[in-house]
Image: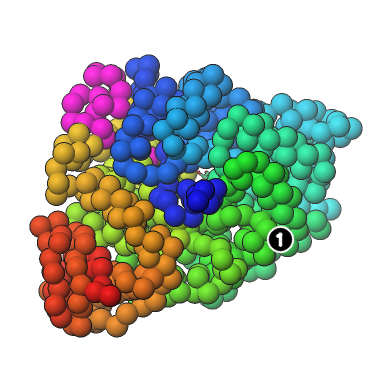
Amino acid sequence: MAEDPRAWWRHGVLYQVYPRSFADSNGDGVGDLVGLTRHLDHLQWLGVRGFWSSPITPSPNFDWGYDVVDYTGVDPALGTLADAETMIASATARGLKVILDLVPNHTSTQHPWFLESRSSRDSPKRDWYVWQDAKPDGSLPNNWQSSFIGPAWRFDEIAGQYYLSNFLPEQADLNWWNPEVRAEFERILRFWFDLGVAGFRIDVAHMLVKDRELRDNPPATDDDPFIEQLHGQRQQYNANRPEVHEIYRRWRVIADSYDPPRLLIGETPVWKPTILASYYGEGDELDLAFNFILLETPFDADAMHEVIETTLAALPQGWQAVWAGGNHDVSRFPTRWAGNSPTRARAALLMLLTLPGTPFLYAGDEILMTDTAVPPDRLRDPIGVQLYPMPFGRDPERTPMQWSAEPGAGFTDPGVEPWLPFGDLAVNVAAQRDDPGSALTLTRDLIGLREAIVDLHAGGYGRVDGPAGWWCYRRGERVVVAINLTGTAGVLGGVHGLLRISTDRSRDGEVLDGDLALEPDEAAIIWLDA
Ligand code: GLC
């Protein structure tokens, strides 16, 4: 029987590459597409089914690729379009799918569209962006705050008006009410799908459409998520607008017109499972919407269980969640969830790879890279620079992949200064690759087990009672995952089966006849007797 053409993301594990930090082939200290292509064997060996790369399109790099100047090109620092085609062909030959990053909410202010748009009120592209005059009293068009820092309106001298800019001043929001903008992005989707790209991760997918009347956001209340309280307002009119769903329904039709159907996955930092679920529509919008609720939840049994349960309950029947432990915007999970404890980080890894839904690993997770402290003179993230010394920058999770402990870390040539400093090179792929007890081997074995056992990749989820502070859950009929998140050893009773994988690998294969004892921060996958 032919495999479901969506099995690669429904059953498999996916991986995120931050291309500037993955592998540098030309000795300039910046990762590139040739370097990435040379390391596809690592992904194949790991057993992931594909990878999402953060933007590869040309950018002046105020926001490192998320300020795009050409949606169908390749940034010269990363390579050429031919390199991208080679990467796609090499990945495809290895059975790996390539997912690119699409940034439709905003362009760089250096994008030719914006240059044209600002040039005159009569410009044919004027309406491609959101231009407004000040209010009669001279104040800003409305009270919206940028998702980064300060008000979301910037005055442009050339245009003589304010433009909407929900991120950096160098990023201008597109006007998604304009049908030409919509048509242009449909063309862009097709351009890359035609080249063999398997799908898109859609940047700030919840924000594209803004309130047509640009109404003021209401103040945040104590019940609102932390981030909205930080900005002092609830994102009622500049995010999660009902009209955004029309766009995804249209994109779904385009993605499904390809064989195999292409994947649409949203970056959806929303804080209620019901809102998250709305991006799946009735199964006719995005295939997957990243769950940021879990990312912001502490590694605590009750708290995490609640996120999983409420998320699954909210999703349309037959559709599934997508989980990540981190990404290029969020502290790495071995630091955030595990306080840099390798033992606890292994438990988090086992958790991530046994959750119901599609797990994404972020490059470096497989060796349990932690956040790297980046000295102030090496900061590259604009948020990190502006808010220094407050720890809000994103450089700590963006440092280069640690392939080996050699000079250059296998990332770049010896003696070359990488674009961001290296972390602790004792943690590296080469050292872990042949070590049966390593995090890397654990990751590979967990992926292999997940692929092999239907209960793990497709079975339901339900919490199982366990000792206080443990998180125990059933996957499908015969799998139980037990995680001892406490600081003391304990025992889960009534377990009859085979311990398939423990974070303490010396226990793999243990026969359990009643009691499962776990050390602090130990986690295990049990195959129950029939
Ligand atoms: C997304 C990206 C982030 C970027 C922002 C603005 O959140 O993941 O890196 O800064 O969008 O484009």
| Relative image position of residue 478 (x, y in whole percent) | 32, 71
Please provide the residue range marked out in magenta. 398-417
| Residue 187 in picture, x, y percent from top left | 73, 35
Where is residue 417, by image quadrant?
Answer: top left
Rendering coords of residue 421 (x, y %): 30, 32
Task: In the rendered view, tell whether residue 249 sits above or below residue 485.
Answer: above
Q: In percent of the image, x 41 and y 33: which residue is there? A: 94
Residue at the right extreme of this rendering: 122
Asked if one can make out residue 443 in the rendered structure from this viewpoint, the answer is no
Q: Is residue 116 above or below residue 315?
A: above
Looking at the rendered structure, the kind of residue marked 1 is Arg
Image color mode: rainbow
Which of 391 and 22 lies nearest the eye of the viewer?
A: 22
Is the CB of mark 1 within 8 Å of ligand 1?
A: no
Disc 1, SS: loop
Depicted 432 relative to depicted 517: above or below = above
Residue at 31% x, 69% y is: 479
On the question of residue 190 being in view, the answer is yes
Q: Which residue is rendered at x = 71% and y = 49% of the image?
A: 253
Asked whether residue 467 is drawn in magenta, I would say no
- The one of 114 and 198 positioned closer to us in this rendering: 198
Residue reaching furthest to the top = 26
Count how many numbered circles sit on residues in the image: 1
Residue 414 colored in magenta in the image: yes
Q: Name the side, left or right, on which 241 lies relative to 524.
A: right
Determine whether, in the image, residue 362 is placed left or right of residue 111: left
Mark 1, Cα crowd under 10 Å, few <14 / some 14-19 / many 20+, is some
Examine the residues drawn in magenta and state their main secondary structure. loop
Q: What residue is rendered at 63% in x and 48% in y?
A: 166
Report which residue position mark 1 lands on. Answer: 241
Above or below, 268 against 476 in this view is above
